[in-house]
């Protein structure tokens, strides 16, 4: 597999593929993703950590921005900057626990560079190059609605700061989930006005809430920090994983908007590599079902040949296998997570 195929697998969007091919001509291209330190981590992070590993395998100089000032603006962890920084240290552990070689990435905190006047000059230049209306449309990058900026002016700073982060870090590729699209597109548009490097944008999917149903946008229906039953925490016990998946939205034969199938496609199958996905069933219901690809799984389910409960049970089994090394890591490195558990304000991201 060529590097370009490697980096673009399991993505929703590349803006643009031709520009990405040009980036690959550089000896050491730069990539980045930003995270707000705001609580404990869910299984959707597996999509991000796998893609970060792809960046590293493709020879990128990769930065993980732990956006503590942004989390403060967004009222995370009670707006307590010390709690936010603690969460950042816990998140560094999460990357290591989920298989990222942390010796090969750069962890940068926003507080590392906010005393640099050049950064704030970029924030102001970005602000002058865009409109209030455009900034308000980008507020979904922080999980906020446009009218929330009416009560708190700092919310309007956030999109300009995120674009300034991209320029300040001098990245060639900005990576994130689809919820970050507005910020990345704003950066591309503004770059033309400021004569800054226009970042290639790579977006991976957002896992749908386990409880999601109905007509919602991907951002609205994603696993929620405020609803623990909507997501699988990386710290959930095997029994908790099984119970959450048993209650998950998974209508018979329905493949669109099915959170259990999404977990299989974006979390489990990338881990299987050449292995088959095995569904253990009683002999009277057909016995063990061996599935060799996600497409085969989707077709089998759509045709009614796989019962939702059997799919949920198999999914829980594989998720628990994926979480075993994560749990082991935190057993050996419990300090930051134990401090996180003591915080009064703790939500899942």
Image (cartoon, rainbow, N blue to C red):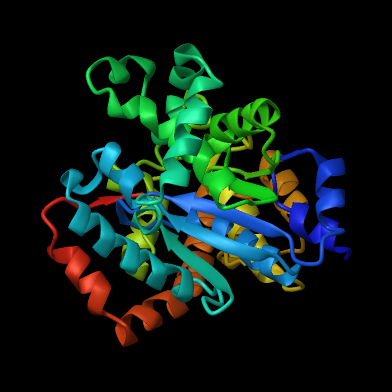
Which residue is depicted at the point 50% across and 21% down?
Answer: 128
Vertical placement of 44 versus 317: above or below?
Answer: above
Q: Quadrant of residue 142?
A: top left
Which residue is depicted at the point 45% across and 71% down?
Answer: 323
Residue 320 position in % (x across, y down): 45, 70
Q: Quadrant of residue 227?
A: top left
84 left or right of 279? left
Vertical placement of 222 versus 278: above or below?
Answer: above
Count of number-bearing discs: 0
Residue 287 in view (yes/no): no
Which residue is depicted at the point 66% across and 45% down?
Answer: 301
Residue 16 position in % (x across, y down): 79, 38
Which residue is depicted at the point 62% across and 51% down?
Answer: 170
The quarter in which the N terminus is drawn is: bottom right
81 left or right of 67? left
Residue 341 position in % (x across, y down): 18, 65
- Which residue is at the front of the view, 181 or 234? 181
Residue 161 position in % (x across, y down): 44, 37
- Which residue is at the front of the view, 163 or 265? 163
328 left or right of 1? left
Vertical placement of 86 versus 306: above or below?
Answer: below
Residue 150 in view (yes/no): yes
User: Quick one: which residue is furthest to the bottom in this view?
Assistant: 332
Q: Quadrant of residue 196?
A: top right
């Amino acid at each position: 597999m060529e590097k370009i195929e490697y980096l673009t697998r399991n993505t929703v969007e590349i803006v643009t593929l031709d520009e990405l091919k040009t980036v690959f001509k550089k000896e050491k291209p730069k990539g980045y993703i930003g995270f707000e330190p705001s609580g404990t981590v869910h299984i959707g992070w597996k999509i991000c950590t796998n893609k970060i590993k792809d960046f590293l395998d493709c020879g990128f100089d990769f930065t993980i921005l732990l956006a503590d000032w942004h989390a403060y603006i967004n009222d995370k962890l009670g707006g307590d900057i010390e709690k936010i920084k603690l969460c950042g240290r816990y998140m560094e552990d999460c990357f290591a626990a989920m298989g990222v070689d942390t010796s090969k990435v750069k962890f940068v905190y926003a507080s590392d560079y906010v005393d640099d006047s050049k950064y704030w000059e970029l924030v102001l230049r970005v602000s002058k190059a865009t409109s209030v209306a455009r900034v308000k449309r980008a507020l979904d990058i922080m999980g906020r609605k446009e009218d929330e900026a009416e009560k708190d002016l700092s919310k309007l700073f956030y999109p300009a700061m995120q674009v300034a982060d991209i320029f300040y870090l001098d990245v060639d590729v900005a990576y994130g989930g689809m919820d970050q699209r507005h910020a990345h597109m704003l950066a591309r548009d503004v770059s033309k006005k400021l004569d800054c490097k226009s970042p290639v944008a790579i977006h991976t999917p957002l896992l749908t809430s386990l409880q999601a149903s109905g007509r919602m946008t991907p951002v609205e229906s994603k696993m929620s920090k405020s609803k623990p039953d909507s997501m699988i925490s990386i710290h959930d016990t095997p029994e908790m994983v099984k119970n959450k998946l048993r209650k998950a939205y998974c209508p018979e034969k329905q493949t669109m908007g099915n959170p259990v199938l999404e977990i299989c496609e974006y979390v489990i199958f990338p881990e299987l590599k050449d292995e088959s996905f095995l569904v253990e069933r009683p002999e009277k219901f057909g016995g063990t079902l061996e599935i060799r690809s996600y497409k085969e799984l989707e077709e089998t389910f759509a045709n009614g040949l796989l019962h939702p409960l059997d799919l949920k049970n198999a999914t829980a089994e594989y998720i628990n296998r994926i979480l075993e090394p994560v749990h082991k890591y935190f057993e050996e490195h419990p300090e930051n997570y134990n401090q996180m558990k003591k915080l009064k304000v703790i939500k899942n991201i």
